[in-house]
Amino acid sequence: MIYSSLLFIYIFLPVSVVFYYFMPRKFSETVLLILSIVFCALSGGYFLILFSACTVLNYVLGILSGGKGKARIIFTVIGIILNMATMFLIRTQIPDTLIKVTGIPKNFFPLGISFLSLSASGYLIDVYRKKTEPEKNMILFGLYMMFFPVIVFRPLMRYDKFRKAVLKRKYNISFVGKGLIIFVKGLSKKVICADNLYMLYTDVKSIGTENLSVINAWIGCISYIFCLYFTFSGLSDMCRGTAMCFGIKLQKDFNYPMFSSRIRYFSAKWHVTAVRWFRHHLTKPLALCTSHVWLRNIVFIFAWGLFGFWYGLNAGSALWGILMGISMVIEHYIRNRKMLKATGVLYTSVFILIFSVFLSSDNVPMALQYLFAMAGGNRILADSVTIYFMKCYLVAMIVIMYASTDLFRNMLNSSVRVQRIVSAVTPFVTLALLIVCTAFISDSGVSDIMIMRL
Amino acid sequence: MKIFKNITAVVIFLFVAIVGGFSVFSAVRNGNFPECDYISAMNGELSGTLEKYISENLVFRDIWRSASARLESEICESIVNNVYVSDNMLLNAEISEKGFIHENSEYINSFASDYDGAVYFTAVPTSSGIYSEILPEYLVNTTEKQQIDDFYEMLGGNIRKIDSYNILKTFKENYIYYRSDNRWTSYGAFCVYRTVIQKLGFLPSAYDKYTIEHVTDSYRGNLFSRVGYMKSKADILDIYTYSNGTDILECKGFYENGKGHECKLYDKSALYTENMYDIYMNGNYPLVKIKTSLNNERKLLVIKDSFGDCFIPFLIQHYNEIAVVSPEYMQCGISELIDKDDYEQTLFLFGIDSIKNGIFSELIVR
């Protein structure tokens, strides 16, 4: 089950919130776990089995790797290998023998498996490095792995931070209100912005690279990166909002990365917790092994490459990560040039767009062909389709681009008066957005288009 | 600003409770719960079924859907569920692919090779083929005309191909296609009938010999059901009756077991059901046999999809017996239904979309 569906918004969420607040407080963690199990069960029996198996396995391995003696590193390594192998098998190709034995369908894809295996591995590493205590409380650990608001698109938080957030949760109606505001914001990002951008993206894709005019190619690329941003940040907002409804504050994943003035700033605001996961568990430990600057740079680029690989599990997305890493290293060395200051937003956007072609294509040759079209290789600047796209999407694009920046938020914070007016109309704006989103998903009952499945 | 957050919580919660509550209530009242078995519960299809079920029982569903189509066309492209919403009509906007064109041409060829009589083929474009200039350009990479030509090219020389595309194109200012359906109207069928019947060896009946009755002006077709856009115009369904012409003596529909059921070419009772289009050849029979009072001993076999439904009545004036086979309802091979060599002529009548999507299968050669 995904958050942007009528089943979740109109039935599961309200029922679980009411249930949660009417149960005695000492049981509330158990209640959350039970609700999460119901959520998984609704997503399918195999989904539930997979997630509970991962939870139990990592619970046991966590205790073992937090124990004494030299054997504990073995358990940690085994745990990491198992988690990664699960993710890899499910996301690429489930072996035929496994399909026959267990009976899982061929296109089985539990949304959120990539996050699950990363956060479980992160937990094991932290336990091994004594950064966090191994969890003995099964319910709390079960929540870390299976808490339903974080299943689909979770912030990759360190275990101790998550535990703190759960234990320090608040029972307060204003938290429900805030949570619902964030949820509806995320829902609108997904349903209104991302789904329509996805349509534009597939339109451009359907033209075929060899007939693509320059402007159309750029339109396709822009729609891809914005669609990706709005899908991810929308899901992340829905997840944070749902958790907030239960009084739990989670970390933010996207901090208005679009239109940053440096590639470094972009990367610092894009998928914050995942980037941080790779830095904590990969870049830092490896960089400590060496004092050579150039080796550290290579480690940095390598970690970004792995991050990209985690996104798409193909050469193109790995190349995206490597290019991001290289560009950041280069940017670091020429950071004082006047050129950078003058062209800040422009050059960052252009590079991000060019790199995103690698993320969007299935393989590298196709990406190169697309870049060729973007550079004008097809010798068409614009055609009648361009005019059609402009006519249909120009206004929407401008609004969506504005919505992706922090300009509106900054305007809110500019004066107390503005803030007061805006918060007074918030209930009605939220309601209006919810109504619009409901209209959009009323036909199929769900908005499950995913530009990238993690 | 805590107070406003509390207000938000209350407002949103009330709204969700009302909409959700009423939807559940109407779902319970309708009672048609989705089926749930072990397999669908295990592999996660259950949540999809539930989502679909809830959306079907959502309160004011028609208004929600109509609003969504309206919003869609305001915000971005006017394409909803792969249907293009233009000012006048709805058009199918699925990107066309060749699909099963090759396989289907093989089946037709092998049908013709062990058949003694003459085989005729009419491939009919859909409304998106005739009115393709309304569609945004990037969707029209291969036109339906091209696809029909390709298909005809693959058919053997012993099959006589009848061009309907150019006829329909010349009449495109007339009401030959429904606004909310991708199929032709009775008038569109009549325009093509005049050519087809000449190729089959008869003189066409004149248009003014027919009395035309508008049975409804509120027909909403298959494209409408995908969009749900209320502002789009409804369609008129017509019934053509030939005054002082040949009478139908017997019209029977057959399933595989061979028992005949009385049926009608025009069944007005379908007007009060969900699918009004069923007034043409109601009943989903794989085989319908029509006997007329005409004593010319001519027999025709028609193999058709739903494009043929409103076409058959025009043929009545020329044949003593017509057998109508609909592959989409067939479970067994054609030889179990009928001996095709009893008929000296066979007319295939298919929309190009069914040829592409493979509705008629190997069953017609078995």
Image (cartoon, rainbow, N blue to C red):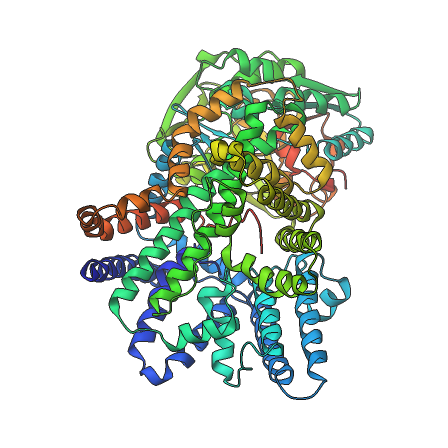
Looking at the image, residue A85 lies above or below residue B327: below
Is A349 on the left-hand or right-hand side of A372?
Answer: left
Instruction: State the count of labels.
Output: 0
Q: Which quadrant is the C terminus of chain A positioned in?
A: bottom right
Indicate the quadrant where residue A66 lies. bottom right
* Position of residue A294 measured from the top left corner of the image (x, y, whole percent): 70, 51
Observer-nearest residue: A22 or B216?
Answer: A22
Looking at the image, residue B191 lies above or below residue A339: above
* Position of residue A111 measured from the top left corner of the image (x, y, whole percent): 56, 59
Residue B189 visible to the viewer? no
Looking at the image, residue A326 lies above or below residue B145: below
Is B332 on the left-hand or right-hand side of B293?
Answer: right
Observer-nearest residue: A343 or A7?
Answer: A343
Indicate the quadrant where residue B108 lies. top right
Q: Residue furthest bottom?
A: A68
* Position of residue A226 measured from the top left corner of the image (x, y, whole percent): 49, 41
Observer-nearest residue: A353 or A23?
Answer: A353
Looking at the image, residue B272 lies above or below residue A77: above
Residue A115 visible to the viewer? yes
Indicate the quadrant where residue A109 lies. bottom right
* Position of residue A172 measured from the top left corner of the image (x, y, whole percent): 26, 71
Q: Residue furthest right?
A: B114
